[in-house]
Amino acid sequence: MTYYENLKKLKKINDQLKYYKTIEALMDLDQWSSLPKQGSAYRQQVAAFVAGQKSDLMATDEVKSLVDYFSAYDLEKINDYVEKGLIRNFLFRYNGTSRVPKEKLQKVSALKAVTTGKWIEAKEKSDYSIFKPYLEEVFILKKEIAGYIDSSKNPFEVLVNITDEGICYDEVVREFDKLKTGIKELLNKINNSDVIIDDNFLMLEQSPQLMEDFARELIFELGYNIEKGAFAKVPHAFTSFMGPKDARISTYSKGLVGLLFTYIHESGHAMYAYGGNDKVNEMNMFGGNEGGFHEAQSRFYENIIGRSYEYWKHTYPKLQQKFECFKGISLDDFYKAINKVQPNVKRTISDEVTYSLHPIIRFELEKELFEGSLNFDDLPKAWNDKYEEYLGIRPNSDAEGVLQDMHWAGDYIAYFQSYALGNIYDGQIRNSVLKDIPDFYSKIEKGDFKSISSWFEKNIYCYSNCLTSGELMKNLTGETLNADHFLKYLNDKYNDIYKFS
Ligand SMILES: [Zn+2]
């Protein structure tokens, strides 16, 4: 059979996998936004059925022969990046979870329902001992799964590579060390600064409807296309990638500034997810690279653009007009308040400087748990010790510490690194943007966001997940992972705010 005959077959399999993914995304959104309590048992049956269909599809003889054919094929011979991306993605998926026996995957999904319940109970009672045996079981199972995928490698590294494809684990460890040290030094300078920032006015109550309308107005201006999107209310924010021209934003109600930045963050995910070109869409390769690279897109809009002085120079008059209480507060004071650095035990409400330390702490703990140098009894203490060492604060309870995030209960193990990787990528992406658009910040100040979103479409979005993050970074910046650029960006920005040199 020829290359094109095989490619056609592969496209058909990929289409089917994408349809299953869309069904799962629809069910996921529905589960968080409107599924009635008593509807959940039947929904679990439907979800298990879809998961089974997916796994059966990957186990067919046709898939096996396609894997044999394309594994032996020299991918470097292929000039079309979308075709090459389709094949690479397929082989990556097959060589990943498809190597794991079906019953192991079913065990993970069954265990997930139990661990989530135990985590909720443990968090409510702030008692880690309720969650501990289940957490330990999840880690043992995950280690086994990593062994099926690649027994020659360290299991944690295998799992990190499933979340962030093509990333070099040793590079991640090296750059995290650099980032950690750099942030600790910067934090020291900020702590010793005489600048006092008042941010109390950010907590003032606002009309929920006004906040919602204003947040949506901002993301439409940034480029979020409502003809390819929709909104929903859920307990935690996320974006659902439903199709090549359908990426929906779900948010939850919280204070004004928190809500604005949540919307901006999610719009960064959404614009990337639906930003593929016609060829990408035709091949059903929409969605973008998962993990750290997706976070880089959302955090670029949230932080690099959204927390810049120029953005608020453009946006603040509109905010003052909508929300009377800001009329007596200057732009400078507002800008400083939204960028105030204050170590917090909670990851989700952390500032731009200290944020990366939170995922790095979790990454280091996961690494030690997989290596066996840390045991599950000592985990809460190790967590708190790291907070004290890196951030100078100590969580007061298990709920504030080790039980803070749902990730470990919800099967997101070896996932946290993505959040810090997103920041590192952003430092590098920002350099490329500035090289191509030297007046980037004055464009923001004028509200000219079109040329910025066009840059992203042309340089990043159009590739969707056809290139790995490493390949994309190499094309954009000529280097792989390098935390220096993000650290320099932070130092320059916060020196301006805290005047420490
Ligand atoms: Zn995100």
Image: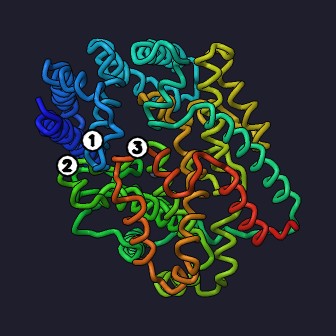
Q: Considering only vertical position in the picture, is 331 above or below 189?
A: below
Screen quadrant of the N terminus? top left
Q: Nearer the viewer, residue 233 or 316?
A: 316
**Residue 290 — which label?**
3
Q: Amino acid at mark 1?
A: Leu
Q: Nearer the viewer, residue 430 or 500?
A: 430
Screen quadrant of the C terminus? bottom right
Residue 216, located in which quarter of the rendered image?
A: bottom left
Residue 180, located in which quarter of the rendered image?
A: top right
Of badges 3 and 2, the one in the foreground is 2
Q: Label 3 neighbourhood size at 10 Å, few (<14), some (14-19), many (20+)? A: some
CB-based contact (under 8 Å), mark 1 and mark 2:
yes
Distance Cα–Cα, label 3 vs label 1 = 15 Å
Q: Amino acid at mark 2?
A: Met
In the image, 389: left or right of 279?
right
Residue 329, located in which quarter of the rendered image?
A: bottom right
Would you say the beta carbon of the disc 2 residue lies within 8 angstroms of ligand 1? no
**Residue 86 — which label?**
1
**SS for callout 3:** loop
**Residue beneath disc 2:** 283
Q: Amino acid at mark 3?
A: Glu
Note whether residue 284 is visible: yes
